[in-house]
Amino acid sequence: MSPSRGRRGTVAVLASLVAVVLSSCSSPSEVSSSDGGGDGAVEATSDQAQEALATAYEGRIGEPPTEPTAPPEDVQLWVVSCGESQPSCAAPSAATQEAAEAVGWDADLCDGQANPGGWGACVRQAVSAGADVIIPIGIDCVSIQQPFQEAADAGVTVIGGGGADCDAVGGPKLWASETKQLDDLTLEETYNLQGRLAAEWLIGRTDGQARVLNVVFTDPLFGPWLSQGLQDGLAECADCEVVGTLEVSVADLAGGTLAQKFSTALLEASDANGVFVPIGGLMSAGLAQAVTSSGRSADLHVISGLGSNANLDLIRSDGGQDAIVGYPTEWGGWGAVDTAIRVLNGEEPLVQGNGYRVVDAENNLPAAGEDFTGGVDYQAAYRQAWGI
């Protein structure tokens, strides 16, 4: 697959692949209120339910690093997108390319086409092209360990853009660094946090009576991590439980079986009043329509992780989704470039601050057409730190 050089306008824009500041304040364009809103909502009367909603809407959002660093010159960067057909891959890939071009780097984009074969081919193309830095977006090292080994052997600096290095599962450390999101949290713990925030929202919206259909994305490492966070959060609620578990994979998405599998699982979980979907992109791949077609949309509280503008539109239109664990995806792309700059300079990679906050129709929802930023002008912060 030939890369697209310097064309961030050719990729879809969305959200994906978060001292720390805990704040319930939204940016001026983000709506905030004290009630959950949405069809099928019940009043959060118990202390636990009210506290759960407050925790979900507050979330955990940090700040970009302020320590100055000078971007080195003449750097050839390759951004490997997990798949340009998926908004949660395209948006952070575009933002990474945008940030690299802002510091004067030559930035190439390679579409991994949503499969390990494509990812590996992109990494090998980057190495052959003489890349100085590779940033894989939403790709775990273990999924294509051999190409990453070849990159390491060639002296290419690899910075993880939302994925985990091979040492996360006992393999060798092949990347210069993962992108660090939140202070004192490992990558696994940041994904656990997303799942826990989803659980808090479900607890609050059901007044402590959540019965959840849990969709688990089995291919990436983060899929089980999200699920574990959800389960840990629900375990703290005495009258909440997971009433159904549906495991899905890239093969289901590619083979067109995803929506039918989900509809069947929803039918079997007849007592479910909540649904957790790990990736927002799955909602627009048929799951949102399956919710509306089920006839139970008004009674189901549906929340996804790793949401995008497309998911925000579903929330606004009552289109089969009620909430997302909001993540400022483009901020993550700029953070990956900041990490690369500091690694190339021989400096310690810093925590980037991009975290999570639950968004629904009445809380933290950006104005139509605007991205979720967590209320932080991250681009201005990075430009100041980089001296550009």
Image (spheres, rainbow, N blue to C red):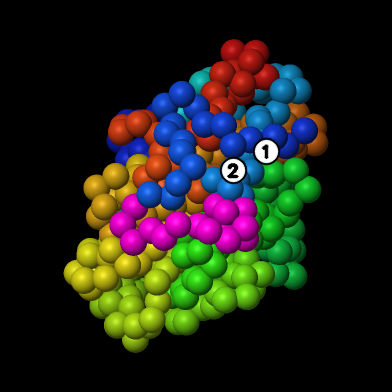
- The question of residue 49 being in magenta is answered with yes
- Residue 380 seen: yes
State the residue in front, 175 or 49: 49
Q: Which label is found at residue 22?
A: 1
Count of numbered badges drawn on the protein? 2
Rendered view: 281 above or below 355: below
Q: Secondary structure at mark 2?
A: helix
Badge 1: how crowded within 10 Å, few (<14), some, or many (20+)?
few
At 62% from the left edge and 70% from the top edge, which residue is drawn? 237
State the residue in front, 30 or 157: 30
Which residue ends up furthest to the front in the rendered image? 45
At 56% from the left edge and 19% from the top edge, which residue is drawn? 380
User: Could you say where residue 177 lies in the image, as x and y percent from the top left?
Assistant: 71, 46
Which amino acid type corresponds to the residue marked 1 in the rendered image? Leu
Q: Circle 2 sits on which residue?
A: 58
Magenta residues?
38-53
Badge 2: how crowded within 10 Å, few (<14), some, or many (20+)?
many
At 41% from the left edge and 53% from the top edge, which residue is drawn? 323
Precedes in sequence: disc 2 or disc 1 = 1
Rendered view: 157 above or below 95: below
